[in-house]
Amino acid sequence: MTKTNALNEIFSFLKRDGLKTGLDSFLIAGLGNPGEEYENNRHNIGFMVLNRFATKYGEVFSKYEKQALIAKFHFNNNRLLLVKPQTFMNRSGKAIGGLVRYYKIPLDNLMVVYDDIDLPFGAIRIRPSGGAGGHKGLDSVINQLGTDIFPRMRLGIGRPPGIQNAASYVLKDFLHSESDILEILLEKSYDAIMVFLQHGIETAMNKYNSTTVV
C-alpha cells in the first residue's frame, strides 16, 4: 500500500467516526447589495462582517466566480471561502447555491450572515435552520438550496423609527451616532464566526445568542 492510500484510509476512518480531519471546506456568505452607493447601508451588514474577516487575515476579494466576489484561503488546514454575492439582495441564492454545489460544501459548513430588523440593534442570533422571516435575500438562498436547514447568523439592525418604511430604512446608512455599537457588533460577529469554524454551531450559539451590544 502506498503512503497516499494509507493516509486516505486513515482520513476515511476518522470521518466515519465523526472526528475532524482538517480537510473540510467552509463557506461564509454575507448578504448585501453590490456598489458603492450601498456600501454602508444597514442591509449590507453581511458584507461588512466579511470585509472585517478578510481584513484581519490580509485577504482581498480578488476572485469572481458564480456571480460573487470571493476571498479564498486556508484556515486551520481547511479551505475557507468568504462570499459576497453580486446579484443584488433578492437574488443572493443564485450565487451562493452555485458555489455550494461547485465546491461541494456540506450544508453544515455553510454560514449565511445577514441583517434583521426584528432584532434590536447590536443583537446576534445564530440558528442551524429556519424560515426566511420575510428576508428576501435569505428566501432566495433557501429556494436555491432547496432546504432551510443550514446555519445562519442574524444581526440586529433595529426597526425603523416612527412610521418610516422598512424597505427604505434598510437601504439607509448607519448613523454616525451608531458607529460605536456597529464596531462592537462587527467585531463580535467575527468572533462568532471564528467559534463556528473552530468549535461548531452549538458552541457558537451558546456563546453568542445572548449577545446584545446595548
Image (cartoon, rainbow, N blue to C red):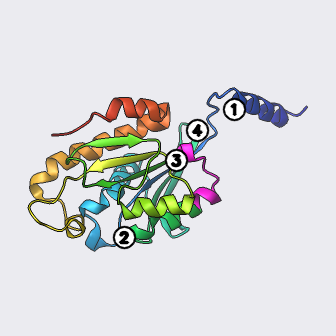
Q: CA distance from mark 3 to mark 4?
A: 26 Å
Q: CA distance from mark 2 to mark 4?
A: 30 Å
Crowding around mark 3 (Cα neighbors within 10 Å: few <14, some 14 to 19, many 20+) is some
**Dot 1 surroundings within 10 Å: few (below 14), some, or many (20 or more)?**
few
Q: Position of residue 125 (x, y in %)?
A: 33, 42
- The residue where tag 2 is placed is 34
| Residue 4 x %, y % | 81, 36
Q: Which residue is mark 4?
A: 77
Residue carrying label 3: 149
- Give, as a three-letter code, the residue at label 3: Ile
The part of the chain drawn in magenta is: 99-110
Under tag 1, what secondary structure?
A: helix
CB within 8 Å, label 1 to label 4: no
Which image quarter holds the C terminus? top left
Name the kind of residue labelled 2 in the image: Pro
- Kindly report which numbered mark, 2 or 4, lies closer to the viewer in this rendering: 2
Where disc 3 sits, the SS reads loop
Task: Looking at the picture, tell me which residue is in the foreground, 100 or 136.
Answer: 136
Q: Earlier in the sequence, mark 3 or mark 2?
A: 2
* Mark 1 or 3: the one toward you: 3
Whether residue 100 is in magenta: the answer is yes
Give the amino acid at mark 1: Lys
Upstream in sequence: badge 1 or badge 3:
1
The reply to whether callout 1 and callout 2 are in contact (CB within 8 Å) is no
Does the rendering let one see residue 63?
no
Find numbered disc 2 in the image and state the secondary structure of the residue it sits on: loop
**Residue at the spot 15% in from the left edge and 52% down from the top edge:** 179
3D distance between C-alphas at marks 1 and 4: 15 Å
* Residue 23 appears left or right of 141: right
Q: Residue 161, position in %: x, y?
A: 10, 59
